[in-house]
Image: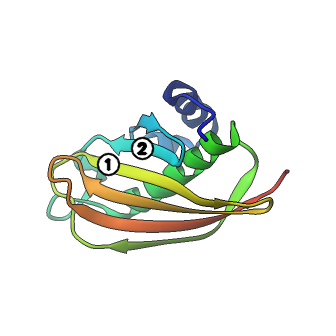
């Protein structure tokens, strides 16, 4: 069950993440019982050759979305660290905002397992799928 509003999640993002992560211009569009929904506004500075939103921006955003999803489910940000993070790219995102939907699949006492679906906001076509495992450092 979500224990946080999108505004509270925005505060966590603003107060606890590295400046370069905040420079991705992530916006939290929703929090629900399973996780967090975010967008990245399209910007040419996040693109590589050919106007494709770069994979580095997508994986950083996916990791951030999963941490926000965990914070929402846990009722606040707790000390945790990424144990494993993988992403599969399925298609490029060109000249459009990016939508991310992060979900907590299992929240244990010491480990949490999450996924993030990534798609173009205009086309709504799946572009990437990320999975993350997080160690919860304090009970």
Marking on residue 46:
none
Q: Nearer the viewer, residue 55 or 71?
A: 71
Q: CA distance from mark 1 to mark 2?
A: 7 Å
Residue position for label 1:
99
For numbered disc 2, what is the local secondary structure?
strand
**At 20% across and 60% down in the image, what residue appears?**
125
**At 63% across and 44% down in the image, what residue appears?**
73
Looking at the image, residue 102 lies above or below residue 50: above
Snapshot quadrant of residue 108: bottom right
Question: Residue 35, how many percent across, how many down?
Answer: 52, 47
Marked residue nearer the N-terminal end (1 or 2) = 2
Question: Residue 20, how many percent across, how many down?
Answer: 49, 46
Whether residues under marks 1 and 2 lie with C-beta atoms below 8 angstroms apart, the answer is yes
**At 28% across and 40% down in the image, what residue appears?**
41
Residue position for label 2:
37
Within-10-Å neighbours for mark 2: few <14, some 14–19, many 20+: many
Question: Residue 81, how many percent across, how many down?
Answer: 70, 59
For numbered disc 1, what is the local secondary structure?
strand
Q: Nearer the viewer, residue 92 or 76?
A: 76
Looking at the image, residue 24 lies above or below residue 92: above
Q: Nearer the viewer, residue 49 or 60?
A: 60
Query: Does residue 66 show up?
Result: yes
Query: Does residue 24 show up?
Result: no
Within-10-Å neighbours for mark 1: few <14, some 14–19, many 20+: many
């Amino acid at each position: 069950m979500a224990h946080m509003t999108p505004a509270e999640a925005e505060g966590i993002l603003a107060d606890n993440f590295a400046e370069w992560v905040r420079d991705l211009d992530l916006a939290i569009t929703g929090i629900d019982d399973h996780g967090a929904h975010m967008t990245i506004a399209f910007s040419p500075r996040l693109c590589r050759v050919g106007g494709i939103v770069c994979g580095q921006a997508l994986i950083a955003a996916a990791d951030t979305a999963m941490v926000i999803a965990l914070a929402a489910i846990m009722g606040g940000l707790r000390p945790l660290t990424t144990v494993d993070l993988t992403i599969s790219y399925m298609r490029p995102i060109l000249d459009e905002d990016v939508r991310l939907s992060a979900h907590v699949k299992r929240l244990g006492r010491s480990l949490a397992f999450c996924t993030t679906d990534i798609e173009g906001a205009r086309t709504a076509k799946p572009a990437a799928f990320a999975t993350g495992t997080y160690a919860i450092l304090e009970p």
